[in-house]
Every structure is written in C-alpha cells, then in structure tokens.
Image (tube, rainbow, N blue to C red):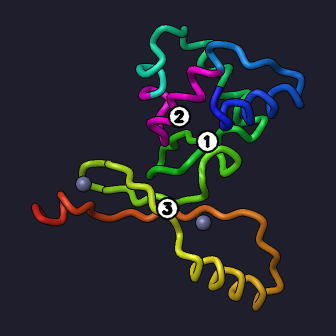
Amino acid sequence: MTSVESTLALHLKNAGFSLTEPRLKVFKALQDDGPLSMQELYSRVSSINRTTVYRVIELFEELKIAQRVAKGWKYHLELTDDFIPHHHHFTCTNCHKTISFDEPKSFDVMLETVANHNGFLPTAHTLEIEGLCSDCRVLA
Ligand SMILES: [Zn+2]
Ligand SMILES: [Zn+2]
C-alpha cells in the first residue's frame, strides 16, 4: 500500500468505514485521472456497478476525501487537499480540457492581504479559470 493509500485507509477507519475494493478503485481513478465527471468515473471503473460507484462518491464527499470542482455549469470530482497537493485548474472553453496548475506563493499572500482588509479569515478557497488552451489559441 502506498502512503496515500494508508492515509485513505486511516481516514475511512476513523469514520468507522473500511477500505473496500470499490473504494480503493474509485480513489485510484481519481488519483490518476482526476478531476473526472461521474460519466468518466463510471467508465474508468466499469467493473463496479454504478450504484456502488455513486455510493462511494457520496461517502467520499461526506468524509472530505473527494470534492466537487465547478466546470462550467457542471461539476467534476477530485481528491481533496488531504490527498493531492493544493492546486487549481484552467478549463479550455473550446476543447474542454482541464489543466492543473500549482498556485504561486505570492497568490496566497495576496489573498490573505485582501481578506485581512475585509476582516475576513479564509479557511479554504477555490479558483477556476476559463479560457483557451495552447492548442486552441493557435486555431482561434
Ligand atoms: Zn489555491
Ligand atoms: Zn482547448
């Protein structure tokens, strides 16, 4: 078991759940290919029936193992910061490709400054950017 998988096992155990085969498979699909739509997730774990996948996601959301990422008016699922490094996404409005990027430290500093000015204490944030990817820019 990798260290991230033992973190998952511990996370589940603390909440009174065990690490079952479907839970591990869904987790690995999100880890390798996330963010994924439910449809994409279903096709990546096609050996597991859809109701089970849906229940696993429901549990993962409840336990903050996975979270929803807005993509236009839909959403995709990905692992939370507890399991993958904190990052954000660029989504191409033309080909719908999603590109992850690490946020620069200066962004955190700027965010904290803006929050402080408003007497606000941020505990979490999301940042989704839409536009054209490098391939689609060339065609535009
Ligand atoms: Zn961030
Ligand atoms: Zn594109």
Left or right of residue 79: residue 99: left
Q: Which mark is residue 30?
A: 2
Q: Position of residue 6 (x, y in %)?
A: 73, 31
Q: Quadrant of the C terminus?
A: bottom left
Q: Closer to the camera, 82 or 111? A: 82
Q: Mark 3 near mark 1, Cβ–Cβ under 8 Å?
A: no
Q: Which residue is mark 3?
A: 128
Q: Which mark is residue 79?
A: 1
Please tell me in which quadrant of the rendered image residue 110 appears.
bottom right
Please name whichever residue, 97 or 74, is drawn nearer the observer in this view of the structure: 97
* Label 3 crowd (10 A; few <14 / some 14-19 / many >=20): some
The first of marks 3 and 1 along the sequence is: 1
The outermost residue toward the bottom is: 117
Compared across the picture, whether 17 is left or right of 102 comes to right
Above or below, comparing residue 43 to residue 31 in the picture:
above
Residues drawn in magenta: 24-40
Q: Vertical placement of 139 versus 69: above or below?
A: below
Mark 2 vs mark 3: in front: 2
